[in-house]
Amino acid sequence: MGADREISLTAVLDAAVHVRPYPGFPLGGDLGVIRPLDDGALVALVDAVGHGLTAYSAAQTARHTLMTTSSEAPEVVLAELDAALQGSVGAVAAVARIFPNRVVFAGIGNVAAWCAGQRLLLREGVLGQRFRTPRVSEHALPAGQWLILASDGISSAKVPLPSGAAETAARAIVESAGKAHDDAAVLAARWVEGTS
């Protein structure tokens, strides 16, 4: 598919998350959320500070906020996460609103994000502890191109170009670029041609 190809009426969003806790821990602080919407999705990747049950607890607070928010604006969602995580170990997060052909994005902290191969900029900080006004950006997301969100448990220098379905791509990135000493999570999403 050409990079400038528009999303057809039969295109569907192929999106998935793969999470691997810190080796030896049954639960971790990384998670991804995909909320389908009529014209795309709200997606987020959260990395709570540390690992184990304390990080897991903060991540579950973030999950609840992401699943119950009425906002679709990434900067508003990040502010809601900051408020919900007050008094916890805190977390970093990337949030994107995916529309046909484009993405609106904002992130706080040391998570990583790429849209159609371009590295996206995030604002420094920790949700629940050191919140700064997020930098909101908009990017083209042509059919067949990936939006990739990754926790800092993924070595960004080793992220391969994904192939296959989103579930396969997210798993492959975690398996090939996941660090041995941290939780690791990847959210992968792209528009693909569906059937009418």
Image (cartoon, rainbow, N blue to C red):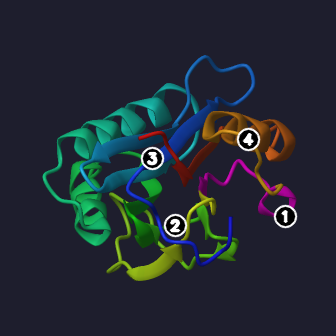
195 and 171: which is toward the camera: 195
Q: Which-is-in-front pick, marks 4 and 2?
A: 4
As helix, strand or loop, the secondary structure at mark 3 comes to strand
Quadrant in the picture for residue 178? top right
Labelled disc at residue 164: 4
As helix, strand or loop, the secondary structure at mark 4 comes to loop
Query: Mark 3 or mark 2: which comes first in sequence?
Result: 3
Q: Which residues are magenta?
A: 148-159
Q: Which-is-in-front pick, marks 1 and 4?
A: 4
Query: Mark 1 or mark 3: which comes first in sequence?
Result: 3
As helix, strand or loop, the secondary structure at mark 2 comes to loop
Residue identifier under label 1: 157
Residue identifier under label 2: 109
Labelled disc at residue 26: none
Three-letter code, disc 1: Ala
Does the rendering let one see residue 106? Answer: no
